[in-house]
Image (tube, rainbow, N blue to C red):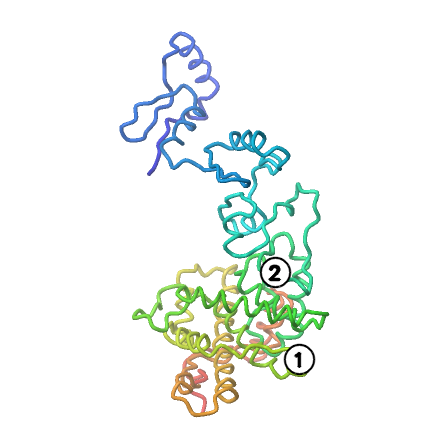
Amino acid sequence: MCLCILHIPLHLSTSRHSTQSNEMASNPDIALFQCSWPECTSSYQRREHLNRHLKKHLKPKEFKCPYCTTVVGRSDTLVRHISRYHEGKESFRSRALRACDHCKARKIQCSMGTPCHSCLQRGLSCSYGTSATSDQPQRTLQTHSTPSQIASFNLDQEMTELDKYIAFYFTEFHPTWSFLHKSSFRPKRESQVLVHSVVMAGLWFSNEKGAKETAIEMHQTLMTSIQHQRCAWDVSHSDATNEATTWPIATYQAILLNTILPLTARKQVSSAGLEFPTPDYEILVALVNSSLKRGMFSYPSMLEQYQQSALTPHTAPHIWIGIEELKRFALTLYHVWTIYCETQMSNKDESQDQLSSHNLQFSAPISDDLWNADTIPELITLVEEEKANGNQICDNEMNWICNWS
């Protein structure tokens, strides 16, 4: 419900303030701010009094004691309660009433308990000690960290440590499976499931002590999360085609990455006594069918994803890169499906035919030399040079992969 508050125009503040002061001095009962809540006739002379009154109409905020079951309506009341009944315990005032590190990083409401409700549900270590005002040292990512510790990392504060493993991803994994665009990949702006998947692959290729074990555990945690959130990305059994909706490309890229690594790494880990989980066939089939239903193997459908974007000299390169990334995702998924069918299926299965080269209704992506340019301006320069040399990028139907003979 919209709450309308009587407002004094700022451009009248100087003269108006004097007039109001005189009026209030002569008539102390004058009310400048009236409550707009239905059937409420309360009015106040000061805005802050009205704002405090309005809170009574809304759902009251609850402050839960971290040491007992007491719930109060004000933060100062909670401080007094802790001081009186839990002598020697840390009060909320010393925490500046801030959310825990996990909730703050994800910008979600924190119950401010020890542990808070969110961390308790997820089995995470709940802490209040990594903020800028804390004297406690921040955690660093260790190769023996548990999946829960890795999943709870604050991407805003701890990217320095994560950057090392992201770099391993792009130097070791990316040259073979280049479906992400390196120069525009910004971890702080990306989906966390994708960033954590990239870090997982980087851990695997880092060859640091304990890194492979952590990568496997992290993969299992990510796949559990992907499975639990399946209703948000799996449209394979949906009646609607969802062509008009925005594709969850970051989630799909994360699923693809978590399929490729176990598919290609199982032989490497067997000699080390580690057992990488078999690629999840059910998830892979759901990804293939969802991508088919959304039209993600179709160039016209790729263009539709950007039809609402204004085409300007600034946005054009980013739109073009986005479409190229969609092409690379589709082509990589096709290759992964082919590899899986050839290596993991002992008998001929009808599902093997559900994705073939005939579904690839788009032209081949640009070359890896262009794709791996260090910066977007450099990529644009290289593309212009290709055009000048007569190598025009053409996406017409004649050049679609499905029409290659």
Q: Position of residue 334 (x, y in %)?
A: 48, 81
Give the residue furthest to the top: 26
Residue 150 disc label? 2
- The secondary element bearing badge 2 is classed as helix
Label whose residue precedes the other's in the sequence (1 or 2): 2
Label 1, label 2: how many angstroms apart (C-alpha)?
A: 23 Å
Q: Quadrant of the C terminus?
A: bottom left
Camera-side residue of 32 and 150: 150
Give the residue furthest to the left: 39
- Above or below, comparing residue 50 to residue 330 in the picture: above
Camera-side residue of 172 and 269: 269
Name the residue type under label 2: Ile
Q: Position of residue 153 (x, y in %)?
A: 60, 56
Give the residue furthest to the right: 209
Residue at coordinates 65% horizontally, 57% vertically from top-left? Answer: 159
Residue 284 disc label? none
Name the residue type under label 1: Gly
- Residue carrying label 1: 273
Residue 166 appears in which quarter of the rendering? Answer: bottom right
Can the viewer see residue 232? yes
- The secondary element bearing badge 1 is classed as loop
53 left or right of 110?
left
398 left or right of 313?
left
Camera-side residue of 343 and 86: 86
